[in-house]
Amino acid sequence: NLTELSKQIHQSNKEKGFWDEERNIGELFMLIISEAAEALEAHREGKFADLNTFLERVPPQTHTQDTNYAKSMFEAWFKNCIKDSFEDELSDVVIRVLDFVGSRGYDVAPIEAEEESSDNVGDMLCYLCELIIDAKKQVCYSAPSLIDIEYSLYLVIDKCYSIAAKLNIDLDRHIELKLKYNSTRPYKHGKKY
């Protein structure tokens, strides 16, 4: 349930200090776009997640263990096998959108990703950025109905899932792992905002 996940993500980000002050809409949407740009850079550099090695080193049953050893193993292997990969950055796009959705109390329908028509990652990510900008316009300028805003945000998430499907990426798994990793990070993940 994406709406429920958006509430959980937003609550976690509040606990990390990201919502201690009112957030600027432009910054929020540019941060979403920056994740798409980082995904392209990861793709250019051939940085893809090594999920098999990660799961061999940190089996799923240890992901929920609350010991210092389990946490440090998870964090170390995540950094080694997944962090800053294409999959990780695509996950960040969805996480940032869902954080925004949670901050506004919006509702997002279940994802039924459309088939991706392009074979070029640059084209896919460029169109994703267009959808992000359109969503920002819906939120800020055109005063549409709530349904229009929610649908525009849904289209951004849907596009991420269609890219993932085209590239045989288990996006739900990567989102789950990134959220777990983010829980180990410091206040505002060590950043200004």
Image (cartoon, rainbow, N blue to C red):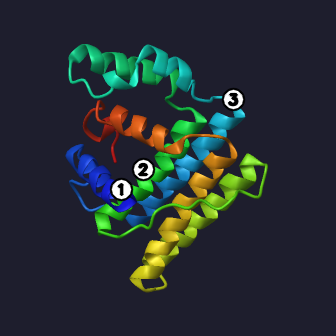
Seen at 52% across and 59% down, the residue is 157
Seen at 36% across and 56% down, the residue is 99
Report the quarter where the N terminus lies. Answer: bottom left
Q: Position of residue 84 (x, y in %)?
A: 53, 32
Seen at 26% across and 13% down, the residue is 69
Amino acid type shown at disc 3? Gly
Q: From the viewer's perspective, is 17 left or right of 35?
A: left
The reply to whether callout 1 and callout 3 are in contact (CB within 8 Å) is: no
Amino acid type shown at disc 2? Ile
Q: Position of residue 188 (x, y in %)?
A: 29, 41
Q: Between residue 51 and residue 87, name the one nearer to us.
A: 51
The picture quadrant where one finds residue 49 is top right
Which structural element holds mark 1? helix
Q: Earlier in the sequence, mark 1 or mark 3?
A: 3
* Up-down relation of residue 44 to residue 18 (above or below): above
The picture quadrant where one finds residue 132 is bottom right
* Residue position marked by numbered label 2 in the rendering: 95
Q: Between residue 143 and residue 60, name the one nearer to us.
A: 60
Amino acid type shown at disc 1? Asp
Seen at 21% across and 18% down, the residue is 67
Crowdedness near tag 3: few (<14), some (14–19) or many (≥20) residues, C-alpha within 10 Å: few
Q: Earlier in the sequence, mark 3 or mark 2?
A: 3
Residue 99 is tagged as 1
Distance (Cα) linking label 3 and label 2: 22 Å
* Up-down relation of residue 76 to residue 27 (above or below): above
Crowdedness near tag 1: few (<14), some (14–19) or many (≥20) residues, C-alpha within 10 Å: many
* Residue position marked by numbered label 3 in the rendering: 46
Q: Position of residue 52 (x, y in %)?
A: 55, 22
